[in-house]
Image (cartoon, rainbow, N blue to C red):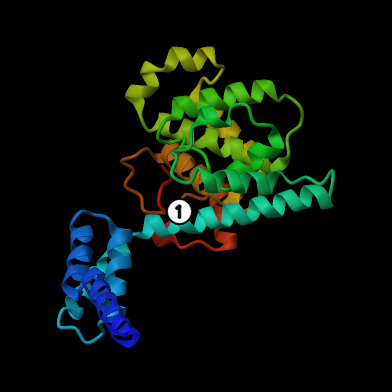
Amino acid sequence: MNNSAKLMILAIMLLMAIQSAAVTSTELYNDGTRAFNNARWQEAEEVLTRFIDTWPDHLLRPQALYYKAIASTRNVTGRINSSLASSAEQWKSELAQLKNDLPGKDLSELQVAIDIANRHNEQPSWQALSDLKPVTLKHYLQRGWHPDSAAEPMTALSWSNDWLKKHTSTLDPDLESRIQLIRARAFWQLLLSPLSLNANSDILKAWGCWPVHNQLEKSLNRGFSTGSAEIKRHIALLGYHFDFFRERGVTGTSSATSKSRWYSYLSERGINLQEAWCPR
């Protein structure tokens, strides 16, 4: 057998091997729909995209596009995680460079942003914030990385009491206002929950958080006096509802707007009354 014949045979064998190893359109489509049916959204999106790109005129293309589009919408969490992970890596690199280029520069905000990005899927906890220094805590609170104080008001008050006892020096005004807003929302939730308020009254008295309506007013005033425009707006809306229900009760029939300093502040800066819902 001459060399030409040998080369021809080898070429045919190679072609047959490639064809046998190649994934058919049906196999690829089935792989994609199987991933979809098993809720592996990212895999389904990638496989079906490959199917659509490889066989744009295939009869199953509309079905593949449907499953691919739905998988893409259900893969939002994966996209967010991927984007945040990528950003966190970039920020870490920039942080390392800045530490070298700007020694002594306060880089705590960048460090907090990296930490939050890496912990995106974690639920914030008060415990995680307990030992933070003021400058670091401020950045976490500014980004809203803390539990909902209205969901667990006693835990929120316990945390704030303990943290404030450890940090008795004058706080940054923005940090002070954010802590007071957390406390105000916790006190407000307790006032809206008379059964829980009564059950926790001994604890609240031991903490020096009694009577609760006085503590709420104190937190509102302190938070408003030191807060930014954003915080003042939140506090004013809560303060208005506190004054309204204190004056008229829940079943008051008057539709007239209660004229309080909180309402004056809100109206001067513009507020959509149809969406001025009572804070939780």
Q: In this view, does 30 lie above or below 157?
A: below
Q: In this view, does 87 lie to the left or right of 175?
A: left
Which residue sits at x=41%, y=17%?
A: 200
Q: In this view, does 277 lie to the left or right of 159?
A: left
Q: Where is residue 276 in the image (x, y as percent from the top left)?
A: 43, 55
The tally of labels here is 1
The secondary element bearing badge 1 is classed as helix
Image quadrant containing the N terminus: bottom left
Q: Which of 227 and 237 is in front in this view?
A: 227
Residue 241, by quadrant, is top left
Q: Local crowd at mark 1 within 10 Å, few (<14), some, or many (≥20)?
A: some
Q: Nearer the viewer, residue 176 or 36?
A: 36
Q: Is residue 64 above or below residue 193?
A: below
Q: Nearer the viewer, residue 23 or 92?
A: 23
Image quadrant containing the C terminus: top left
Q: In this view, does 218 lie above or below 36?
A: above
Q: Is residue 146 left or right of residue 95?
A: left
Say which amino acid is labelled 1: Asn
Q: Is residue 230 above or below residue 106?
A: below
Q: Position of residue 189 (x, y in %)?
A: 42, 33
Q: Where is residue 179 in the image (x, y as percent from the top left)?
A: 60, 36
Residue 64, by quadrant, is bottom left
Which residue sits at x=31%, y=85%?
A: 2
Which residue sits at x=30%, y=78%?
A: 10
Query: Would residue 275 be seen by someone viewing this image from the given angle?
Result: yes
Residue on which the image places disc 1:
81
Which residue sits at x=31%, y=60%?
A: 43
Residue 197, by quadrant, is top left
Query: Would residue 227 be seen by someone viewing this image from the given angle?
Result: no
Q: Position of residue 118 (x, y in %)?
A: 53, 45
